[in-house]
Image (cartoon, rainbow, N blue to C red):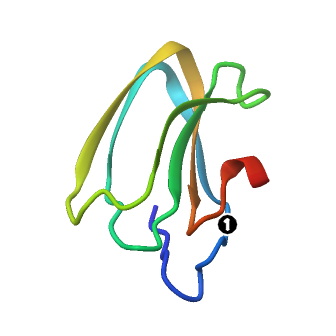
Amino acid sequence: MYVEASSPNYPSVGPFILESALDIPASYVEFYYHMYGDTIGTLSLNVSSDSGATWTTAWSLSGNKGNLWKLAEVPLLSPATNVRFIGMTGSFSLGDM
């Protein structure tokens, strides 16, 4: 998933959502992220154990993290059947949704 965080997607555009069902329930999620620039907002990973009926935030990160790809390894409290990435640009908060 790529979300452009500079103008015109700043300030506060989104959410940008990428959602997927899993073939086999997962006990962890591993992915790479790149969050670089002054207008970077928030990237969150939500998981569901009941096919998307309810969601829990398993991981979230905000702001400029440098011009590098970084690995996130997220252990889950219960096996997930669905995952959802949510990207927000700028100063927009997930609490504003």
Among the 4 quarters of the image, the one containing residue 89: bottom right
**18 w.r.t. 56: above or below:** below
Residue 97 visible (yes or no): no
- Residue at 36%, 72% (x, y): give it: 37
- Name the one closer to the observer, 2 or 58: 58
x, y (%) of residue 48? 65, 26
x, y (%) of residue 38? 40, 73
Residue 55 visible (yes or no): yes
Q: Residue furthest left?
A: 68
- Residue at 73%, 47% (x, y): give it: 95
Dot 1, crowdedness within 10 Å: few (<14), some or many (≥20)? some
- Residue at 46%, 61% (x, y): give it: 1
Compared across the picture, whether 69 is left or right of 21 comes to left
- Residue at 50%, 51% (x, y): give it: 43
x, y (%) of residue 25? 51, 19
Q: How many marks?
A: 1
**38 w.r.t. 80: above or below:** below
Residue under label 1: 14
Compared across the picture, whether 67 is left or right of 45 comes to left
**78 w.r.t. 2: above or below:** above
The residue tagged with tag 1: helix, strand or loop? loop
Q: Residue furthest top?
A: 78
**40 w.r.t. 63: above or below:** below
Among the 4 quarters of the image, the one containing residue 68: bottom left
- Name the one closer to the observer, 79 or 55: 55
Q: Please name the amino acid that badge 1 sits on.
A: Gly
x, y (%) of residue 24? 49, 21
